[in-house]
Image: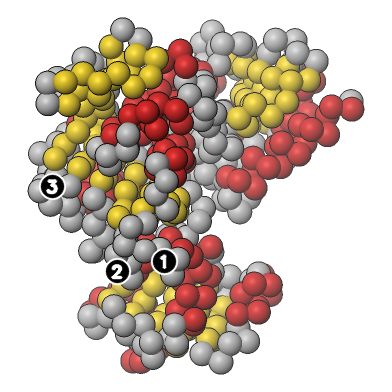
Amino acid sequence: MIVRNKNFLVIGVAKSGIAVTKYLLSKGAHVVLTDIMSKEKISTEVGQLLKHPNLKGIFGEQPPQSLLVSINYIITSPGVPMDIPILERARKENIEILNEIELSYRLISSWTIAITGTNGKTTTTSLVGEIVKASKRETFVVGNIGTPMISFIDKATQNSCFVVEISSFQLEGIQQFHPKISAILNITPDHLNRHKTMENYIFTKSKVFSNQVEGDITILNADNVNTFSLVNRTKGRVVLFSRSLSLDEGVCIKSNEIVVKDQGKTIPICPISEIKMPGSHNLENVLAAVAITYYANIPVEVIRSVLKKFKGVEHRIELVETIKGIDFINDSKGTNPEATIKAIEAMSKPIILIAGGMDKGTDFTELISFFQGKVKHLVLLGETSDQIEHIARKQGYNNIIKVSSMESAVTKSYEIANEDDVILLSPACASWDMFSSFEERGNLFKEIVRSLKGV
């Protein structure tokens, strides 16, 4: 793909939009960067970029459709809705619309592993990245995990490996993206405000393997009905993993040990007791990571060694502090009910749950049903607090406190907590009603918790 002297419209000034703009300018392209955010609110980094002679900025409004006369390619950020007027017009004019992942893929010759799923993406991607790095292969862990893929394509060689966490928003823009190994960890209801139906959401997730061919590997969760339903939709070789089934082929549990069953052989990988991360959901993430790396031809001893050391990722069931016998757990990455259910299941002590956030059109009924015998108090904040309260009271759960800030949520929780309780931030919602990201939400929670140590 030729970039030099081409005209690009980049929509969105989040991480990927900024990274794409920097790359394109460095290669001699002409760029129009646009966002509905006003010019006063854009970052200093974007402000500095705007000094480049090949960059024009349009902020605080939708870009005029007259721009399209001179545009060769449009690059969208993941949060940009695909039905905005300028994109509808661009399709009619046959202007190619790409996202950062698709653009990056077209510019590399490296080996690619892609990991998607409703939950567990970041943990699994991080673990796979650590295992591949330990095999002495140059590895770049990128994508929805927080680092744009395009930031590393100049450093990558044909022998490098990109381990890509890819979200449903990013998968919407896939056209040629072709990972040698793809994995779908699970699919449960999420982002239905964007995808409208579960059928659309499942189809979007399946795009991770849409360009795979015979000789490629597609890894699916046999325990999740939605992922298992996709076994006949890929042209790649299907490898299953399961926490509950004894598989004839794939990765599963045998006598409390993770094993790979491959062409009649049973290869022991690691006893479950030696895995450091808490929770049954993390066991699923480990099984997926084993499947990915085993079929990427990583030596078993390397896989085993990393599994025994890996402790998890920030913002996912992360122990922040224990104060006066009370554990404070940061699970800000729990952005949907299924993730929060898994966090609740991972706790062995009584829970004070801090939840609520941006409304994604989610049903919280099942979440509330998991409170019995586990969640002693529910502290709510954010856009969905009224909705969650209504559903909880309808189900007979009344130990509810509503607050307006994270600081109030933490201090109120601490006031009502007893020794041997857990204060768990696991919002079951996105962060964008009050915060720029789940990381910002989690970091504020940790900052407030640590300020309590002197109280």
In the rendered image, the quadrant that contains the C terminus is: top right
Q: Residue furthest right?
A: 454
Which sits earlier in the primary sequence, circle 1 or circle 3? 1
Residue 426 in view, yes or no = no
Query: Which residue lies under the disc numbered 2?
Result: 106
Residue 322 in view, yes or no = yes
Query: Which residue lies under the disc numbered 1?
Result: 153
Instruction: State the image quarter where residue 240 is shown.
Output: top left
Which sits earlier in the primary sequence, circle 3 or circle 2? 2
In this rendering, the label closer to the viewer, 3 or 2: 3
Residue 5, horizontal then vertical, whole percent: 39, 91
Give the secondary structure at mark 3. Answer: loop
Which sits earlier in the primary sequence, circle 1 or circle 2? 2
- Residues at marks 3 and 2, CA–CA distance in whole angstroms: 20 Å
Residue 14, horizontal then vertical, whole percent: 54, 64
- Residues at marks 1 and 3, CA–CA distance in whole angstroms: 25 Å
Query: Which residue lies under the disc numbered 3?
Result: 215
Residue located at (51% from left, 30% from top): 310
Residue 20, horizontal then vertical, whole percent: 46, 71
Question: As shown in the figure, which amino acid type bears the numbered disc 3?
Answer: Gly
Q: Is residue 205 left or right of residue 425?
A: left
Callouts 1 and 3 close, C-beta under 8 Å: no
Q: Is residue 396 left or right of residue 434?
A: left
Give the secondary structure at mark 1. Answer: loop
Residue 361, horizontal then vertical, whole percent: 42, 43
Question: As shown in the figure, which amino acid type bears the numbered disc 2?
Answer: Arg
Residue located at (64% from left, 26% from top): 319
Q: How is the image coloured?
A: secondary structure
Badge 3 density bin: few <14, some 14–19, many ≥20, Cα 10 Å: few
On screen, residue 151 above or below 162? below
